[in-house]
Image (cartoon, rainbow, N blue to C red):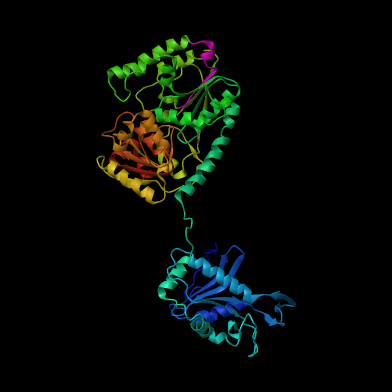
Amino acid sequence: MPHSETGRMTTTGTETPRLANAAERRVWDALVDQLGPDDVVIPGKRVTDHLKDHEVDFVVAIEGAGIVCIEVKGGEVWHDGQTWWQGGRGHQHEIEPVRQVRDACYALRDYIEMDPRWTQGRLRWDHVVVLPNTELPDGFALAECPRWKIIDRTDLPNLFAKVRAILLTQEIDRPFLTAAGIAELKEALSGRGLPQRSVVARALENEDAADILTEHQSVILDAIRLLHRVEIRGGAGSGKTFLAMEQARRLARDGQRVALVCYSHGLASYLERITATWSRRQQPAYVGEFHDLGKRWGAPEGPDESVRNDDTVQFWEHDLPIHMADLAAQLEPGHRFDAIVVDEAQDFADAWWDPLLAALKDEDTGGLYVFTDEGQRVFNRLGSPPVPLVPLILDQNLRNTRQIANAFQPLVDHPMRFLGGEGPAVKYVPCSREDAMGAGDDEVELLLDQGWRPEDVALLTTGSRHPEQVERQAAGSAAYWDSFWDAEQVFYGHVLGFKGLERRAVVLVVNEASAFERSRERLYVGLSRARDQLVVCGDPDFLREVGGPDLARRLNIV
């Protein structure tokens, strides 16, 4: 199947194309001087079929006539009775101009006629050779090439008229080229199914670079190889989760029994999916939520976590950890861990560390590797490991674009260096709290229209949940988090459940009824979940109150 290489499209003489030589320039000048206002000349058109690559020096489309392909041969050109020759600057070589332009013309015609946008059928096509420096005898003729197929230097002043006459007198059973046909020709020659600039392609390039930087950061794990109790602190986008998984993988690979633990359902789902792809020898013995670890030991299911009252808080925050500590103390040696890795450790209350330490084979020297970001302490609980840990600071943002990282920098409790790629500016949509959800829905549609795929986009709320999230959660936690991996759906979530997770494009709906103790942390989490494109919808006064004047300035809140 032939295909055409897109070249410069010229319809008037106001554009000067880059031409191969002075001979082509003379022909070009003659064409643009003589063509009518609605006619078209296209220089240097390449076309490829199953046989070879072809190039047409000029494609000329004449309204009321047809389409002609022109091959230009400069220098001295002659025919010895058997072969065409071209000479210049002391050299000469064989040429086949007639076959060259004929084959190219047929290939181009086939390409045009196979274009689904071409509705004209078979029109008048022809091909000629132009010799701008050569004069042919009046009696010139070849079996495969009559005199009218060759335009020499004496014909150049009447180039257009001769080409038009050829189209009018040959293939008289074919229809003439119309203005609509010229428009379709130009459209077909401009290409079809062309890759456009893609927001996804840009995001993937940034991700590739971020992945390399994140992997390079694992040198930190080499540095702590001989340390067994470490706290690694880092802001959003610093690669903490990658390092937590990599540390668990390395320890398991070295023969240790490892637990990789977090608090939230969403992050646990992510960790479970990723580690499941590793070889069995590298997989931790346990991957998942802290509370599910207790259930594995025999702890009760407990009440519905979504219901927050005094009784449920008492169970999840106090009774269950105490019960888990008792169960951990009774574990057989084969069910204990050589090391425990905790991601998003700022979510853990004081009482939660006791069962983890009790589950170690050696409570005093067993490995404890804690990954934390105090800026993302979004729950009303405080806690820290009750044992000494060697602190390390990650001060580089690798995962967000510079534009996004710069926007949430005022909410980070330590300076960060921005090493991420470039992306679009953060978009702020001013609206009331009541209108923020609707504005967010509109922005999701705009992102999809821009070329983002559903799998690239998440809408996150800071206050009440989106109705779509409510509906999906009604099917159960597992089904809801399965939707996070569904390539056909935009993900709808809440910042509390999205900690540790990312999306290429995020619409953050700031819809809390009023500011409270953890509003700043929620805002920080929400702003930092987008890797490439971030849209913020919310009340400007609320954002200024919670985030401060520096954040307002960076979001262009006036």
Q: Quadrant of the N terminus?
A: bottom right
Q: Using the rendered image of the protein, determine whether residue 235 is visible from the camera's viewpoint.
A: yes
Q: Relative to the observer, which residue lies in front, 229 or 17?
A: 17
Image coordinates of residue 77 in percent, x first then y, are: 68, 81
Whether residue 369 is situated above or below residue 124 in the rendered picture:
above
Whether residue 3 is situated above or below residue 381 in the rendered picture:
below
- Report the number of numbered marks: 0
Whether residue 235 is situated above or below residue 432 in the rendered picture:
above
Q: Is residue 342 magenta?
A: yes
Image coordinates of residue 150 in percent, x first then y, are: 60, 82
Whether residue 8 is situated above or below residue 300 in the rendered picture:
below
Name the residue at the bottom extreme.
138
Name the residue at the right extreme.
90
Q: Is residue 437 left or right of residue 366?
A: left
Image coordinates of residue 462 in percent, x first then y, are: 32, 35
**Which of the 4 image quadrants contains residue 154?**
bottom right
Q: Using the rendered image of the protein, determine whether residue 18 is visible from the camera's viewpoint.
A: no
Q: Relative to the observer, which residue lies in front, 430 or 496?
A: 496
Image coordinates of residue 281 in percent, x first then y, are: 58, 25
Tell me where the magenta segment starts and ends, as one range.
Answer: 331-343
**Which of the 4 image quadrants contains residue 476?**
top left
Q: Is residue 191 magenta?
A: no
> What residue is at 51 percent from the left and 32 percent from the top?
242
Q: Relative to the observer, which residue lies in front, 282 or 216?
A: 282
Name the residue at the front extreme.
173
